[in-house]
Image (tube, rainbow, N blue to C red):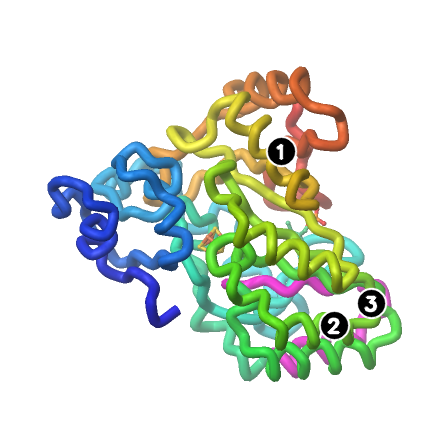
Amino acid sequence: MREAFRNPRHLLEFLQLPDPEKFKENEFSMLVTKSFAKRMEKSYDDPLLKQVLPDAKEEDTRSDFIKDPLKEFSTPYKNSPNILQKYQKRALLITSNACAINCRYCFRRHFPYKLHRPKNIEQAISEIGMDSTINEIILSGGDPLLLDDASLKTIFNQISTIKTIKTIRIHTRLPIVLPQRISEGLIDVLKLVNQKLVVVVHTNHPNELNHETKRAFTCLKNCDAWLLNQSVLLKGINDDGQILIDLSEKLFDQAVLPYYLHLPDKVANTSHFFVNIKEGQKIHKEMQAGLPGYLLPNLIKEIPGQPSKTIMSA
Ligand SMILES: *Cc1c(COP(=O)(O)O)cnc(C)c1O
Ligand code: SF4
């Protein structure tokens, strides 16, 4: 993380792009790991660069794009911070308030992470333990794998005292953006997990996958983890049937199954990435025609108040 790019000018110089002043910073700072930057092509049109480079278009303030379209700021579970529960049987734990990359389109870009402190995690897990209807804990954030191995071990140990929890799910982008994080130490910790282990990563474009991500996934597989991917459908990045077909096939080469393809949420400052439902359905149909059923992700949208994510395929 010390090597990560935090200054857009440095990133653009690293990529040897002309006019390195071609960015527009704002309060959501740039952050991108060197490993991810090395997978970029030297072009302003690069689909990886577009995911992370601050852009003047973010200043667009369309009134239908708001800070909390998913109504997450005001729906804590019981009285405990750090827990979001929207659906039956599974509770999401905010374990970390940071990511290893700042995705410009992030749906939690405006999330009040300050209210969810790492020191509350122990309390939050015991709160979840008191509700026997919950059988799955989702570690999310931010990125839970930014916690150190000892903190993760403490969390897993505490969860293992709750008999009703059958599955631990980790939502992380680190196997993609910082594959070195899948280290021997982390593997040792994950091998101690007794519950079913599911790792859901986040990849949007086939160029994000290389030999480093493959090594990371192989290690996770060796911990008996189920590996799934979610993508966000993003204008100018992956709003193309063939790109997403290639992504599904490449994920499968690395032992990961496509899970969800999210239609973007109307989050403030992200309108330039927006893809509407009709366009999304058309792209999804092209994918369906070009892939075996098991490599087709569900096209979904989150509609606040619904008992699950909503499947939107035509
Ligand atoms: C999306 C989400 C989940 C996971 O839903 P699945 O359909 O099981 O993947 C769980 N909790 C929260 C708060 C979510 O936003
Ligand atoms: S990794 Fe996920 S939570 Fe983190 S910035 Fe990207 S989209 Fe947001």
Whole-angstrom CA distance, mark 1 to mark 2, is: 34 Å
Left or right for 262, reference 306: left
- The image quarter containing residue 56 is top left
Residue placed under numbered mark 3 in the picture: 195
Q: For the point 57% across and 37% down, which residue is it?
A: 262
Which residue is nearer to you in this view: 109 or 79? 109
Location of residue 27 in the rendering, given as x and y in whole percent from the top left corner = 26, 58
Q: Which residues are magenta?
A: 121-142
Residue type, mark 3 in image: Gln
- Choose mark 1 or mark 3, whichever is in front: 1
Q: Is residue 101 visible?
A: yes
Residue type, mark 2 in image: Ile
Residue placed under numbered mark 1 in the picture: 248
Which residue is nearer to you in this view: 166 or 312? 166
Residue placed under numbered mark 2 in the picture: 128
Q: For the point 70% across and 41% down, which residue is it?
A: 257
Which is nearer the N-term, disc 1 or disc 3? 3
